[in-house]
Amino acid sequence: MMSVSELLYEAAILMVVGMVVVFIFLTLLIFATKLLSKFAGQEEAPVNNPVQPSNLNAPAPVIAAISAAIHQYKQNNK
């Protein structure tokens, strides 16, 4: 039968080995992630196309109805 000090020594060795394995795995994971991000490239910024006003003229009652609907929506969703 092993003494308490021998058991504690083996437990400490096992703990250190486990910590080293986890450290190596996490280090490899970080490098793999960085390597993959270089292959994936940068995201392209969305192109901002200026909004062109339409040439269609809506009747005044339609514009008023849309404005009232937007106002009511904003009031109800505060």
Image: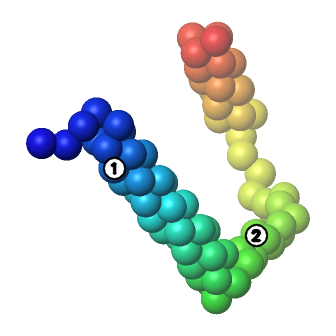
Closest to the observer: 2 or 61? 2
User: Residue at label 2?
Assistant: 46
Q: Is residue 68 at all visible to an observer of this figure?
A: no
Closest to the observer: 76 or 34? 34
Please identify the residue farthest to the bottom as the structure is shown. Answer: 39
Q: Is residue 37 above or below residue 72?
A: below
Q: Position of residue 57 (x, y in %)?
A: 77, 51
Amino acid identity at mark 2: Pro
Residue 69: image quadrant is top right
On the rendered image, what quadrant is the C terminus found in? top right
User: Residue at label 1?
Assistant: 10
Q: Position of residue 19 (x, y in %)?
A: 48, 54
Q: Position of residue 34 (x, y in %)?
A: 66, 75
Q: Which residue is found at the position 64% from the left and 83% from the top?
A: 35
- Count of number-bearing discs: 2
Q: Which residue is found at the position 35% from the left and 37% from the top?
A: 5
Amino acid identity at mark 1: Glu
